[in-house]
Amino acid sequence: MKKIALTAEAGNDSAPPLGLAPQSGGQRRVSAGGDTAFRWLTFTCSMLVPLVMLAIGADLITSSLPALKKFGVGFLFSEDWNPVTESFGAASSIFGTLVSTLIAMVIAVPLSLAIALFLVELAPPKVSRTVGTMIELLAAIPSIIYGMWGLFVFAPFMANYVQPLLGKGLGFLPLFQGPPLGIGMLTAGIILAFMVLPFISAITRDVFQLVPAVVKESAFGMGATTWEVTYKVTVPYGLVGIIGAVFLGLGRALGETMAVTFVIGNAHRIATSLFSPGNTIASTLANEFSEATEPMYISSLVALGLVLYLITYLVQVVSQTLLRRMYRAWSVGL
Amino acid sequence: MKRRPSTGRRAVNLLVTIWAAGSALIGIGILFWIIFVVVSRGLGAVNLPFFTQLPTPPGVLGGGLINAIAGTMVLTCAATLLAVPLGLFAGVYLAEFSEDSKLADFSRFSANVLMGMPSIIVGVFAYTLIVVPLGHFSGYAGALALGILMLPVVTRTTEDMLRLVPNTLRESALALGAPRWKVTLAIVFRAAKSGLITGVLLAVARVSGETAPLLFTALNSPYWFHSLGEPTPNLTVTIFNYAMSPYPDWQQKAWGASLLITAGVLVITLLARFTLREKKL
Amino acid sequence: MMEHVHRQPDMPSYFETLGPRPKISVRNLNFFYGDHQALFDNQLDIAEQKVTAIIGPSGCGKSTHLRIYNRIFELYPEYRATGEVFLDGQNVLDPAQDLMELRRRMGMVFQRPIPFPLTVFENVSFGLRQHYRLNRSEMADRVEAALKGAALWEEVKDRLHRPGTSLSGGQQQRLCIARAIVVEPEVLLMDEPCSAIDPVATMKIEELIKELKSRYTIVIVTHNMQQAQRVSDFTAFFYQGRIIDFGATADIFSKYSLLEEVPAKEQLDALLAQERPDARSLS
């Protein structure tokens, strides 16, 4: 219904009219019922994200069913990986994923906490900002670049310097026996540590900054050193958040693909030495998926993917819950 | 009264300070080491033919990666076109209309989970969704995988940036009789513009360096491509293939491509950060 | 003279004896934020083309009350209003009411000047675009007229395409006034329009209000007693979500000696008890 524009107030002669006679071309617009449509459109879009997440899970399950049916639960524990006889098992991949991630976390967590401490408590603001940006750039470097650097530069470095040293000094442990190939589980773990470091340190940094200043100040006022305030006050206060950050890093390490693929050696076996090659779920998928043609081969690979999806999902749930709890407790938006 | 800590405790503090500074140095050191390696090894490969010629057959020297460069740009654009509108609207819902609902919380939770999902799993998903029915690898599958990776990032940053816009701005626009959708698109978006752009840039930076999701979706190709319906050449998978090959010339090109990718990603990331920082001032 | 406090709708209204029908009539208005009640049984008449000031201590519901007139509170789902607010005899709280048109007729100026992230020109023309289809020259004419009406034209006529935020605080507030009047409202709702700007700019806006009242009905919420006394014809006195008195400004101000001293809490509580014998004052 086209409404007619208002005329100037008829009885309003005590003041000059506002401007022009509004009825010239003052055609009224239809008021929008577009708002309901807009709400629905945006709602639908926001539901796409959970839909995709669930769809990925559902898809992985359906595509891996043939393999799961054939191998059953034994799939998780079998070290076999033979495309020719079509005998597949996830054990070596799961083992490699867990071990490389463990190495990464053992190295990255202390480093990340130390860096967060440095940035928040020890460095002057300008230094903190610059160094902080540089650490964050570590996260921006693509995985494949880590892989290139890892394969062509870091692995030889490991082979020529680090591994011989470790072999000499700690060679009595089965962990450090075997030829210093450079590529292998240890190298992959170390590179993973550097990739995961910026994530853990960024969140830990937030956590440290969120601890109320009054709490820290009262500790300082009693004569505590910076380190003492940190481990006695800041860390316990923010422990939930720090653990959440660690789990976040854990999740990333579990799923890292290209860097690991370059340096882990792609061997389907479980070995005791960290110097030996192995594989992770992600590296196996990267190396073999495009080559796989037989349905059972593909289905087994997808089954590997399903295992990774589930592990990652679980880790994410834990991380999210912890971080949310921390942010909510401190009334900060997530 | 503040007591001076004992010598022993001060020594511990000093050690910790050294350890903390040392850790930061290690982090920076690795960053510079990587950049140095990429630049020094890649610079030699990046010449004019690199940007203008197609790859030569294996073992034959010369040629370039123009198809891969174009392919990466097209795939990234396609992914952006897919993810950005959806992500923007999703973020709008979460910021403007969600009113504490459980569904909205689940959406946010899913976005976080999806962001932590290994990108290769997303590749598997795109494979089963597009490559299998079509019967061949295609750029569409690759763009879909990349788009899925971008979607949660854009959604989250959009929501965060829109929440920063004060409610009084919305009220003043509504008080003039504007419908809610217009208030959001014409006014609130404009107010949050630099933040929204930052979000998009960061998402683009993230996916332009991705390899895993393309490995068995877009695959790779040594030829020019005519549409996204076929295997699409791209820089990242090229790096993977060339690096694993026995040809020194190809390995050299892999470094050149690495340099290109690294430079692109770092530049976009820094650009995004500075856009945001300027807005905050 | 003491009888002009409204209690029930069927009492003779102040205006029935003195002038035309009120522009706005508030009847039995209650307002809730979740479970918490913020406004209690408000009854009020707003005279046409006069300035009505709403005064009272902070937090007593003045702004809340004003923000019901154009239903801007509906942006927040936990807010709820019951009762009626009649604009020219039509209840604006009726869900069937055309909200866009209502808001065109009731312009609002907020406490903090908040120009849109657009140019000066676009700030003013935004409202026009929502309600009218105009060509460029018509648009330009209307924008100019609105800016003149807000006493801002001379200062910005060469800067129409600069960002709205490049103006000073007082100018921004006048820009917001221009933005509100360009769509030719009948009522101007002003929520403490001068509290965030300097005294000189405040003076300019007060002069503007005196000019504007010849064209618009103005309702102004203010915590500045002198300002209320300077610019308004009628005053409504709010306390703890209730209107405890209403009348001609001169009467109200002399009755409570508002310019000499702030009314004591005991005095206000006594008035409140008068108004609502069952209400306890919140200490």
Image (cartoon, coloured by chain):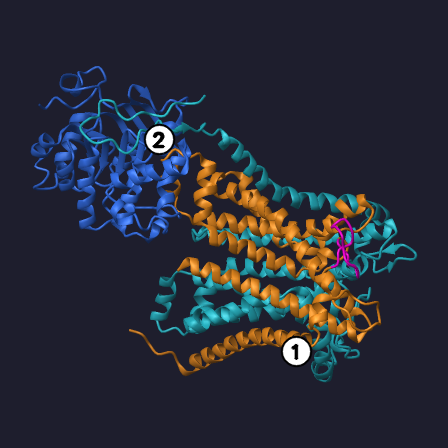
Residue located at (47% from left, 46% from top): B189
Q: Which residue is mark 2?
A: C104
Q: Which residue is mark 1?
A: B40
Residue B236 % position (x, y): 71, 63
Q: Is residue A64 visible?
A: yes
Q: Is residue A33 above or below residue B270?
A: above
Report the magenta stretch's main SS. Answer: loop
Residue B82 is covered by the magenta coloring: no
Would you identify the image quadrant in which residue A144 lies? Answer: bottom right
Residue B90 % position (x, y): 55, 43
The letter of the blue chain is C
Q: Is residue A313 visible?
A: no
Query: Closest to the observer: C205 or B103?
Result: C205
Residue located at (71% from left, 57% from top): B71
Q: Is residue C13 above or below residue C61?
A: above
Quadrant containing the N terminus of chain A in the rendered view? top left
The letter of the orange chain is B
Label 2 to label 1, Cα distance in Å? 65 Å
Residue A297 % position (x, y): 85, 53
Query: Closest to the observer: B50 or C3?
Result: B50
| Left or right: where C134 falls relative to B1 | right
Residue located at (50% from left, 51% from top): B196
| Left or right: where C13 falls relative to C133 | left
Would you identify the image quadrant in which residue A194 lies? Answer: bottom right
What's under tag 2, amino acid-wise?
A: Arg
What's under tag 1, amino acid-wise?
A: Ser
The letter of the cyan chain is A
Residue A305 % position (x, y): 75, 53
Task: Please report the bounds of the magenta region as a residue range.
Answer: B218-233
Q: Is residue C138 above or below residue A158?
A: above
Q: Chain of mark 1?
A: B
Query: Closest to the observer: A283 or B53?
Result: B53
